[in-house]
Image: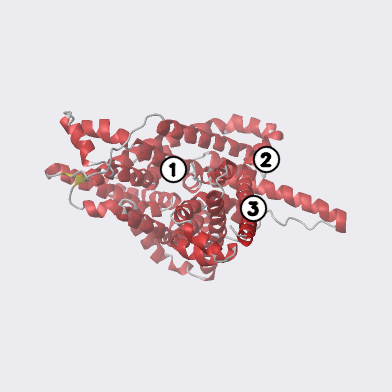
Amino acid sequence: MTAATAVNAARAARRGLRRVPAWRLAALGLAGVTAVPLLVVFAAWLTPETEIWRHLARTVLGGLVNNTLALIAGVGAGVLVLGVGLAWLTARCEFPGRRFFDWALMLPLAVPAYVLAFVVLGLLDFSGPVQTGLRGMLGQDLRLPEVRSAGGVIAVMTLAFYPYVYMLTRAAFLGLGRGTLEAARLLGLGPWATFFRVALPTARPAIVAGLALALMETLADFGTVAVFNFDTFTTAIYKAWFGLFNLQAAAQLATFLLLFVALALYAERRLRGGARYHEGGRGAPAPRVRLRGGRATLAVTAAALVFGLAFVVPMVQLLIWAVDAMGDLDRRYLNLLWHTLGLGGSAALVTVSAALVLAHARRVDGDPLTRGAAGLATLGYALPGSVLAVGVMLAFTALDNGLNTLSRLVTGEAHGPLLAGSLAGLLLAYLVRFMAVAYGPVGSALERLRPSLPEAARCLGAGPLEVLRRIHLPLLRPGLLTAALLVAVEVMKEMPATLLLRPFGWDTLAVRIYELTSEGLWERAALPAVTLVLAGLLPVVLLVRRSAGN
């Protein structure tokens, strides 16, 4: 080794040493951003609101707990039955229309639960067209079960969230090889015994993962329960904030919601981590069981009924209402659309950039601290938007108070709130909430990138920014675009954090839907709802194409 080579190697080593702590520092910073809202929420217990809690305990606390437990139990059972049943039907059975239902049953994922909720109420409420028509045919004394009930909310959420279980379980059932099922048959197991004793345990990790996602969405939901006037912790947080104007009480209520989330995550780990089932190689795919006669008719009816109730009927009704509400297509609607697109685009840019930094830090720095920071920074997806909103507002209010104190000392005047109620709070909440959504595609794209390419560029004299611009960004473009699209659409549909943190007058389509549905104006809420559903179809089409590719 020549002296010049040794000097260059030493310089490269020093540059590398300097770079590693910088990436690690960035990862720790992003993890800290995620942790701050949580710490702030729990810090609210340092000053307990005893009077408020006595009032809540006397009036609504018991109902909140009962309603939340009923939702978890009902939606959990519903999505398991629909998701697992339909996944087995399309993955392992052959019946007329199977190829269509294979992907069509994923489409309800594009319909936000709060949109499905107001369509159901608009159709099935006492004054809706269904009950009115039935009373006209069968008599005015006809009374149907009350739609605005726990059963109604559970049914709506089941139809909205079953695709999480369906997608993951279907992939697991498709992965069952011919050898596994033939071995079960050779051991004398019939079709039902094969399903319960072989297929179901093998797919258990996927089923539990899908169930956990559905329950997270259930706990985080605000729009659906608000439309049904069904009080849960998310509605209680909103009422404590805007009804009692008590942010501390809202934060303390948010910790109860986090307790349910933590229990759901713990149950998911326990259920998924106990037993071990291994597939001994894919091998040839197992042939589908061909259904004939009454069984085929039953399969088509079941798939069509779920698809019709969860997607076709809501979309048709929304389009009919939207045609009648075209008069709302004015300047205000365009402003709502612009705000929605602007927020989605800004949040996608911020979140995907942070995800790229986090994924790159984890790639170049194998330190356990960096890996732990990456894991912590992606935990925000498990946090309900209302909890994040409370944490961000409390943190920004404290910062504003500090800045005002400093301003009085320096200038003798206070400047008022700068951060609380600003777009910065919204973008921070979106960053924390959807970091995991962006990190997945970006991280997997980065993992596929061969390390030799950036190393060769650095050997040719390219600096870190040039390597990023000329090597990483072009090769990561598909993953970055997928991540940006997923984040943008999730932000456009997000309601609780947007409702609580938006600046005054900065309404979005989701907020407008909440305002109109809270007044019972279903028809006028259809136009922004159709826009959100069409936007939500984009990531679903991506998922369908990826599923078809697999």
Q: Quadrant of the N terminus?
A: bottom right
Q: Secondary structure at mark 1?
A: helix
Q: Position of residue 482 (x, y in %)?
A: 44, 59
Question: What residue did someone put label 3 on?
Answer: 22
Q: Position of residue 42 (x, y in %)?
A: 64, 37
Q: Nearer the viewer, mark 2 or mark 1?
A: 1
Horizontal relation, residue 35 to residue 80: left or right: right
In the picture of the structure, the residue carrying the numbered disc 2 is: 248
Up the image or down, 503 lies above or below 175; here it is below
Q: Do we see residue 243 in this rendering?
A: no
Local packing at callout 3 (Cα closer than 10 Å; few below 14, some 14-19, many 20+) is some
The quadrant where residue 79 appears: top left
Residue type at mark 1: give it: Leu
Is label 3 or label 2 in front? 3
Tell me what residue is drawn at x 33 percent, y 33 percent. Answer: 277
Residue 200 in the image: above or below residue 95 = above
* Residue at mark 1: 213
Marked residue nearer the N-terminal end (3 or 2): 3
Q: How is the image coloured?
A: secondary structure
Instruction: Name the residue rendered at 54%, 39% in the picture.
Output: 233
